[in-house]
């Protein structure tokens, strides 16, 4: 099954289904890969922040000094 797009002529209201070109398919695949990389980066950053929060909480309970990044995370 070929990938398609719908093209609408706003002046006439006529729409047609057109197959994507090889260039459009390549861009679609590149965008998908980039989206997956962006999602992975967001997950890594969320895990890093969660670890910082846990570290800050443990240090507060233990009465030890926080790093500047931990303090900034707690303050907002």
Image: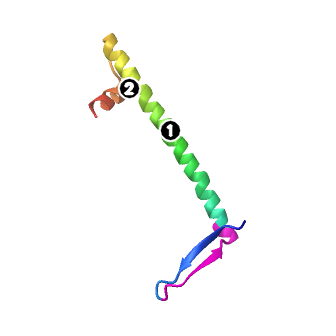
Q: Tell me if 46 is positioned left or right of 24 in this view.
A: left
User: What residue do we see at 60% from left, 71% from top?
Assistant: 5
User: What residue do we see at 55% from left, 42% from top?
Assistant: 40
Establish if 46 lies above or below 29.
Answer: above
User: What residue do we see at 48% from left, 41% from top?
Assistant: 42
N-terminal of the two: label 1 or label 2? Answer: 1
- Residue 13 among those drawn in magenta: yes
The N terminus lies in quadrant: bottom right
Residue 43 numbered tag: 1
Q: Which residues are magenta?
A: 12-24
Establish if 47 lies above or below 24.
Answer: above
Q: Tell me if 24 is positioned left or right of 63 in this view.
A: right
Residue 18 sits in quarter: bottom right
Task: Tell me residue 56's x, y (percent).
Answer: 36, 22
Taking the view exactly as shown, the residue that stands out farthest to the top is 62
Measure the alpha-carbon separation of dots 1 and 2.
15 Å
User: What residue do we see at 66% from left, 63% from top?
Assistant: 26
């Amino acid at each position: 099954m070929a990938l398609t797009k719908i093209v609408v002529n706003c002046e006439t209201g006529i729409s047609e289904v057109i197959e994507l070109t090889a260039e459009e398919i390549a861009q679609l695949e590149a965008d998908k890969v980039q989206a997956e990389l962006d999602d992975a980066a967001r997950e890594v950053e969320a895990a890093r922040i969660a670890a910082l929060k846990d570290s800050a909480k443990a240090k507060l309970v233990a009465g030890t000094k926080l790093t500047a990044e931990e303090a900034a995370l707690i303050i907002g």
